[in-house]
Image (cartoon, rainbow, N blue to C red):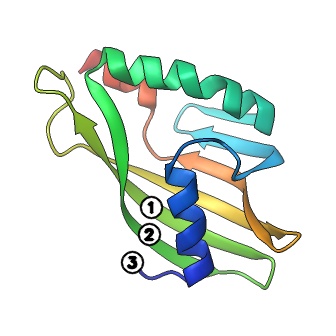
Amino acid sequence: MKVRDDVAEFFERFAAGDGSGFHPNLLTLDPVSVTPVTREQVVASLPKRKEFFAGLGINGMVLDSLDESPIDEQHTLVRSTWRLERTESSRVPEGTIFTSTYLLRRVSGEWQIVVYLNHQDLRSLAST
């Protein structure tokens, strides 16, 4: 992992999944959509996302790698990979990795996600 310590610490907290790392207003992207959302909308979607994954036999995701490209003192671009934790009966192939890219902005000394790009269409998992 090639990241600054404070960015690595941010992603440790983010991986816990409480949604606190999102800016109050952010942009989410995937291969089929671009959506401006609020932090509250993201947090409200987390239980539905967990339910969707559970239906596919995925019981979590583990941060696999991080790579940071600082932009300036206030912004940094972070590429990540996430390894799916699956049940034995999961329809999702073993070893499936998700890739995401984040644009972080420092707000009052803390990193926040302002752009969240999922490189895979998560809905396509349902057809595997």
* Crowd tier of the residue under label 2, counting other residues whose Cα lies within 10 Å: few below 14, some 14–19, many 20 or above: some
Q: Helix or strand or loop: what does disc 1 sit on?
A: strand
Residue at image point 22% right, 33% down: 86
Residue at image point 49% right, 65% down: 79
| Dot in front, 3 or 1 | 3
- Type of residue at label 2? Leu
Residue 126: percent from the left, percent from the top? Answer: 33, 17
Residue at image point 82% right, 74% down: 109
Q: CA distance from mark 3 to mark 1?
A: 9 Å
- Type of residue at label 1? Ser
Would you name the residue on which mark 1 appears?
80
The picture quadrant where one finds residue 42 is top right
Pointer 1 or 2: first along the chain: 2
- Type of residue at label 3? Met
Would you name the residue on which mark 3 appears?
1
Q: CA distance from mark 1 to mark 2?
A: 5 Å
Visible residue check, residue 38 = no
* Crowd tier of the residue under label 3, counting other residues whose Cα lies within 10 Å: few below 14, some 14–19, many 20 or above: few
Would you name the residue on which mark 2 appears?
66
Q: Helix or strand or loop: what does disc 2 sit on?
A: strand
